[in-house]
Amino acid sequence: MTEMDGQVPERFARAREAQSVALLEDYVEMIGDLIAELGEARVADIAERMGVAQPTATKAISRLKREGLATARPYRGVFLTEEGADLADRVRARHRTVVELLVAVGVPEGVAELDAEGIEHHVSDETLAAFEGFLKSR
Amino acid sequence: MTEMDGQVPERFARAREAQSVALLEDYVEMIGDLIAELGEARVADIAERMGVAQPTATKAISRLKREGLATARPYRGVFLTEEGADLADRVRARHRTVVELLVAVGVPEGVAELDAEGIEHHVSDETLAAFEGFLKSR
DNA sequence: CAAGAAATATAGCAATGGCTATAAATCAAC
DNA sequence: GTTGATTTATAGCCATTGCTATATTTCTTG
Ligand SMILES: [Mn+2]
Ligand SMILES: [Mn+2]
Ligand SMILES: [Mn+2]
Ligand SMILES: [Mn+2]
């Protein structure tokens, strides 16, 4: 038991908080991808790409709306707010950086893609900056 | 839309699965720490270190018991099964490797400690092996 | 060994994120 | 423009993980 043990609970709390935001980040990034690829994001496509049932996607979209990240008209597609689109861009860039960092330290491409989907949500701005610095300085 | 888009849902599913195991891993590692430090793991200490209310810890311990990772006699301490102790050891080693890897690529020590708490649960065996290889070959 | 204090368990609530079944709306095809 | 197919919304279920309030058990102290 060292003298900085009081920091441990905050560390766990931070990880829990990141976890609660992770789902929002993945949906927003993915909805942005759909709009870029198909011109629109339909509930069915969101559910399929997310690997969940359609009502599960609908419920998640409700949360995105409530948090000001998306809008949706019933029976029409889903759209990102400016805040949602900004978040999507940051999340997408971070995702790519995490994959690149993993590959750079020797993780096989496919494995890097898999692990990055979870890892990305726990990479802070400072860590992201360090990753970018490392990638540049090789 | 590339031709491997069908892999995306499985990627998200994997991240969800890792998330559901994360809490078990953190509790088991932490209970192992308490036993090593104090000779026993009391519910109050588990709750305090986890940063949650005492009934929340009790409920988590119920899940550990149900999954065969821990045992507990009412009003007495919590103990790890052999399986639980093995998991704790693996999780602790992985945690340390993740912190070392982060520091090795330039993440400040304190930030590495914080981010590792969440990242660790999404680091697969292959990625862990790559991290170890990278750390050795510097 | 009897209180009172401390620790633990239990009850019950809320939010989240899954699911299936089904109602309602939209779209397509005739 | 009806009708049948498709898509979306809604209802209602369950498990998980938080919480507070309170009952119960154990520990400590006089
Ligand atoms: Mn992700
Ligand atoms: Mn991602
Ligand atoms: Mn952790
Ligand atoms: Mn850990």
Image (cartoon, coloured by chain):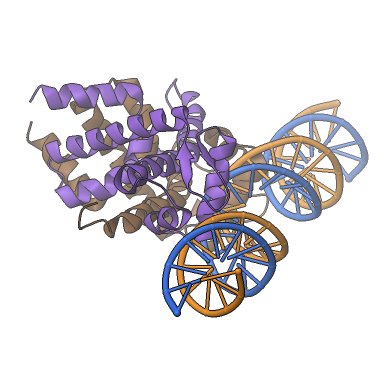
Chain colours: A purple, B brown, C blue, D orange
In the image, B90: left or right of A43?
left
Displayed quadrant of residue A90: top left
Front-lying residue, A21 or D23? A21
At x 42%, y 48%, the residue is A41
Instruction: For residue B123, say whether it is visible.
Output: no
State which image quarter holds ligand 3.
top left
* Direction from residue C20 to residue B74 in the image, left or right: right
Q: Nearer the viewer, residue B40 or C18?
A: C18
**Quarter of the rendering containing residue A62:** top right
Question: With respect to residue B100, does A108 lie above or below?
Answer: below
> Which quarter of the rendering shows the N terminus of chain A?
top left
Examine the rendered structure and indicate whether residue B25 appears above or below residue B118: below
Residue A2 vs residue A107, the one in the foreground: A107
Locate residue B106, reporting x and y percent: 21, 22
- Percent coordinates x, y for residue B94 in the rendering: 29, 43
The residue depicted at 26 percent of the width and 21 percent of the height is A129
Q: Position of residue A66 (x, y in %)?
A: 59, 37
Above or below B28: residue B115: above
Is residue A12 something that shows in the picture? yes
A37 to the left or right of A43: left
Of residues C28 and A76, the one drawn nearer to the viewer in this rendering? C28
